[in-house]
Image (cartoon, rainbow, N blue to C red):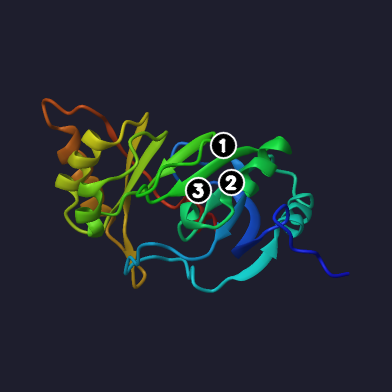
Amino acid sequence: MTIQITPNNPQYRIVEIFESLQGEGWNTGMPAVFIRLGKCNLACSWCDTDYLKFGMMSLSDILGRLKTYTARNIIITGGEPTIQPHLDTLLNTLKAEGYFLCIETNGLNPAPPQIDYVATSPKACYAARYEKSCIEKADEVRIVADGDVITFCQEMERKIRAQHYYLSPCEQDGAMNIYDTIRQIGVLNSRPDAPVHWQLSVQTHKWAGIE
């Protein structure tokens, strides 16, 4: 049977849809369905997602896939979700179905109002773009330590209000800079006038051998 594509049943760039546990940040361990959308407005050299390899799925096909899973939390991720065409239609439909919606975004664009939990990951390698504009509020900020990011973290403290701030190690060619990451966390938290407390976030799902 051919699925009819209409304004109420648009298509989306889907890298993958799968059910797992959130492996990072404040919601670590939360059962969730991940909807990974294709394409990004950045191109970080260390990115572990091939966001240019995607297929097209209609909204009705996505809903059909979701009904095969048990989790009621959905994490919209990418690539960069906020550049996805027809995103509002997808989110409105998921909210109507009663899902709790989280988004993982690089923070260059505002988070959609339908989102219940915003995890933003500003990229220090694009610091100049964040100087011009970025998201102003999130539930958590999660920055990858792809070098000396202390100054960038301080800038994000000023620009983005959040409940939680995390620094994550950067993995390149199988090596993870965990020592340097925790060293930088120590520097940030040892400031006498530190306005926020930074914590370590690691990709625990990789340790557990799950997606």
Q: Amino acid at mark 1?
A: Gln
Tell which circle, 2 or 1, labels the residue nearer the N-terminal end: 2
The quarter of the displayed image where residue 201 is located: top left
Please tell me which residue is depicted at 38% across the width and 62% down the height of the picture: 41
- List the single residue furthest toward the front: 7
Is residue 207 visible to us here? no
Q: Is residue 183 left or right of residue 73?
A: left
User: Which residue lies under the disc numbered 1?
Assistant: 114
* Number of marks in picture: 3
Please tell me which residue is depicted at 25% across the width and 37% down the height of the picture: 159
Q: Residues within 10 Å of mark 3 (few under 14, many from 20)?
A: many
User: Which residue lies under the disc numbered 3?
Assistant: 23
Q: CA distance from mark 1 to mark 3?
A: 23 Å
Front one among 122 and 170: 122
Is residue 85 visible to us here? yes
Question: Where is the C terminus found, in terms of image quarters?
Answer: bottom right
